[in-house]
Image (cartoon, helix red, strand yellow):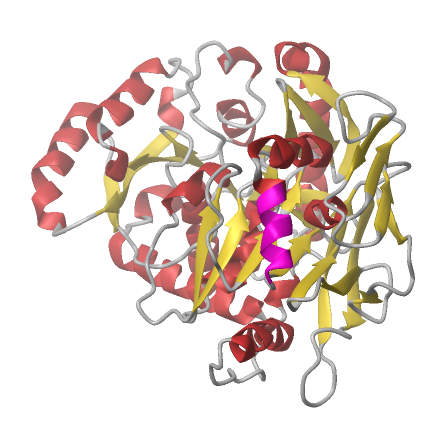
Amino acid sequence: MVLGTSSGAGKSLMTAALCRVLRRRGEQPLPFKGQNMSLNAWVDQGGGEMAYSQALQAWAAGLEPQVAMNPVLLKPRGDSTSEVIHLGRSVGTARAEHYYRDWFRPGWAAIRTGLAELQAAHPGGRLVLEGAGSPVEVNLQTRDLTNLRLAQYLRARCLLVADIERGGVFAQIVGTLALLRPVERPLISGLLINRFRGRRSLFDAGRRWLEQETGLPVVGVMPWLDELFPPEDSLDLLERGRRKPRSELRVAVVRLPSLSNFSDLDPLEAETSVQLQWRRPGEPLGQPDAVILPGSKQTLRDLGILRSSGMADALQAYVARGGQLFALCGGLQMLGQELHDPEGLEGDRAGDRMAGLGLLPLRTLFQGSKALRQRRSRALWPPGPGEPPLVEGFELHQGHSEQTDQADCAPLTEDSLLGWWAVSGTQGGLVAGTYLHGIFENGPWRRRWLNQLRLRRHLPPLEENQPHHGRQRDALLDRLADAFEAHIDLAPLLAGHHSPDRR
């Protein structure tokens, strides 16, 4: 199990690195996080929701993601409430103060079921567990579902990760160990220092002090990697400010308060010619080459914030001046004429009805169950040379949208319900949106979309014959594993390996 001294210490990526390294050594690692709180989700082949970080770890392990790897997913809705998802299916809503009273037993049952399903599908595999937050939140320890309770249940060897970039690394480690209960302390097998800048020899004295003080080996010091890895949560987006000296296009992304599925933007972030600029509601939009309105867990609430902050007016004015606006999922719903929530599925109360931005002739009704499925279709927009590219991804949304005027917009793909596009105003403005998460991962379509932006700037076109972003992501995981193997000694964790079936 990979534990962290805090949220954001790097547990997710260290778990992914460990999975890739074990895979290289001929084992079958089985990534597993009993409970995750995240708005960055993935839909598996069975149509179930899971956290994107466990999907990434599955790819690192050479496996197809499955919801058993993340049996409990909490999706915050604001006001101290979260949607509760067990084994890929929504099972209700929980308030923070009642979560452990109402959901502890069902959550533990879901975790045990997920473990059983994962081990049955891959007998002989080695579980690689990821903890959540800190394992020593003293007010939660007795009801913690996914840290040391799970480690004890599986007799897991635990690696404690601390982020030296944030400062106070000695206090992080010593304080965490001091707060462990006597029965938990022997579970910790080693310490890992993450995100170290500079010469590692400068930390030699600190390493010796930690080993003498704690009696545990420091298995390694991971350097600060100048790579772009998927963020673990939306807070990490604030740290994604690297400048690209060769960028030619500026794409503004609206950072919605309830932003979801931000990994949709990773393929654009990986384009050297594109500089993403995150803009909060109320901040000046500027004059980017395009604006992206991403998905939201609270579409009606975020739409209200766009209006109250002035961002809605700014987006409408941007399009009127000839700008290009592209929206994803909840962002697509906001572009329409009206959003109606008769059952209170998306808003604060049943019967909410709100006017959209009026940039696409769509009406959205929030009713019934979620759309959860992987999809593939042929793109009809943007136009370009040769055969229209295939696009694949997944749907994950509440609500159904339909056109109110068939003449004023056209379908984005051959599946006419996956997205729409329309020319807006007299200045060449263009508005488009899709329900297809992962559309930018499709290399030919992504480059075709970028090329129609480049054409407006009289820039030469980019090569459109590009592989799926999954190949680039896999290469990134290899580089992460290379660094892990170069700097981390796994012997304290792997010695005396026992079967993951042992209790």
Near-viewer residue (280 or 226): 280
Residue at 64% x, 50% y is 316
The image quarter in which residue 446 lies: bottom right
Residue at 35% x, 14% y is 179
The image quarter in which residue 35 lies: top right
Q: Is residue 37 left or right of residue 391?
A: left
- Could you say where residue 158 lies in the image, as x and y percent from the top left? 41, 34
- Could you say where residue 443 lies in the image, as x and y percent from the top left? 59, 74
Task: Please tell me whether residue 124 is drawn above or below residue 379 in the rendered image.
Answer: above
Task: Please tell me whether residue 65 is drawn above or below residue 344 in the rendered image.
Answer: below
The image quarter in which residue 175 lies: top left
- The residue lying furthest to the front in this view is 426
Question: Which residues fall within the magenta stretch?
Answer: 313-321
The C terminus appears in which quarter of the rendering?
top right
Task: Please tell me whether residue 108 is drawn above or below residue 181 in the rendered image.
Answer: below
Residue at 82% x, 66% y is 411
| Residue 1 seen by the camera | no
| Residue 142 seen by the camera | yes
